[in-house]
């Protein structure tokens, strides 16, 4: 059972905020155009913000769950720190990414969309792990 009191909750919060910032940058200025093109999403469709609040809410909740899972896994480390946080974040991202690949193959999804999602998950989860580990 994890030691809930040992978890750096402020670090979890900072990691969640960081994940939202990375997502904004990833699907905005960094890879927004190729993602939209691969998804077949027009600028007009992007202007339609209906459902956007729900997407942000669900995304934030999922980021919080991911951050707590990383923190719980770090409680298993003898001395949680930046390096162990990065390692745990990388391992979690590899598990998540492998399922994105499985889904891509079975559902015949666009490879560009999947690769953008996978690279986002790897970067985001490693950064989240680093933040939580560093703030231990």
Image (spheres, rainbow, N blue to C red):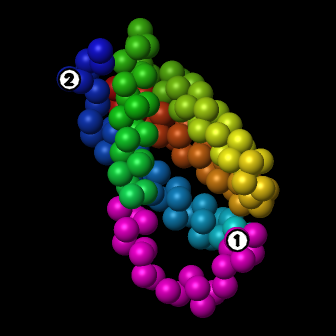
119 shown above or below 91: below
Within the magenta stretch, is there residue 75? no
What segment carries the magenta color?
A: 36-57
Q: Nearer the viewer, residue 126 or 48?
A: 48
What residue is drawn where x is 59% and y is 70%?
Answer: 28
Q: Is 29 situated left or right of 59 in this image?
A: right
Q: Is 101 situated left or right of 61 in this image?
A: right
Give the quarter of the image for residue 39: bottom right
> Quick one: SS at disc 2?
helix
The residue indicated by pointer 2 is: 5
Q: Quadrant of the C terminus?
A: top left
**Residue 16 in view of the camera:** no
What residue is drawn where x is 41% and y is 14%?
Answer: 76
Q: In the displayed orientation, state which residue is furthest to the left.
A: 5
| Residue 59 image position (x, y, % from top left) | 43, 57
Within the magenta stretch, is there residue 54? yes
Give the mark nearest the N terminus, 1 or 2: 2
Count of residue discs: 2
Q: Nearer the viewer, mark 1 or mark 2?
A: 1
Disc number for residue 39: 1
109 shown above or below 99: below
Q: Is 80 situated left or right of 38 in this image?
A: left
What residue is drawn where x is 43% and y is 31%?
Answer: 70
CA–CA distance in space, label 1 to label 2: 43 Å
Q: In the displayed orientation, state which residue is furthest to the front.
A: 106
């Amino acid at each position: 059972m994890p030691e809930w009191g040992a978890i750096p909750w402020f670090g979890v919060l900072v990691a969640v905020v960081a994940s939202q910032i990375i997502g904004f940058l990833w699907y905005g200025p960094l890879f927004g155009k190729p993602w939209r093109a691969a998804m077949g999403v027009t600028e007009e469709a992007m202007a339609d913000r209906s459902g956007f609040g729900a997407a942000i809410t669900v995304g934030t909740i999922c980021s919080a769950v991911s951050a707590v899972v990383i923190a719980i896994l770090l409680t298993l480390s003898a001395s949680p720190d930046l390096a162990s946080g990065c390692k745990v974040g990388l391992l979690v991202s590899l598990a998540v990414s492998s399922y994105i690949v499985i889904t891509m193959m079975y559902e015949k999804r666009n490879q560009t969309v999947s690769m953008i999602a996978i690279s986002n998950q790897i970067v985001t989860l490693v950064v989240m792990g680093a933040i939580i580990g560093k703030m231990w």
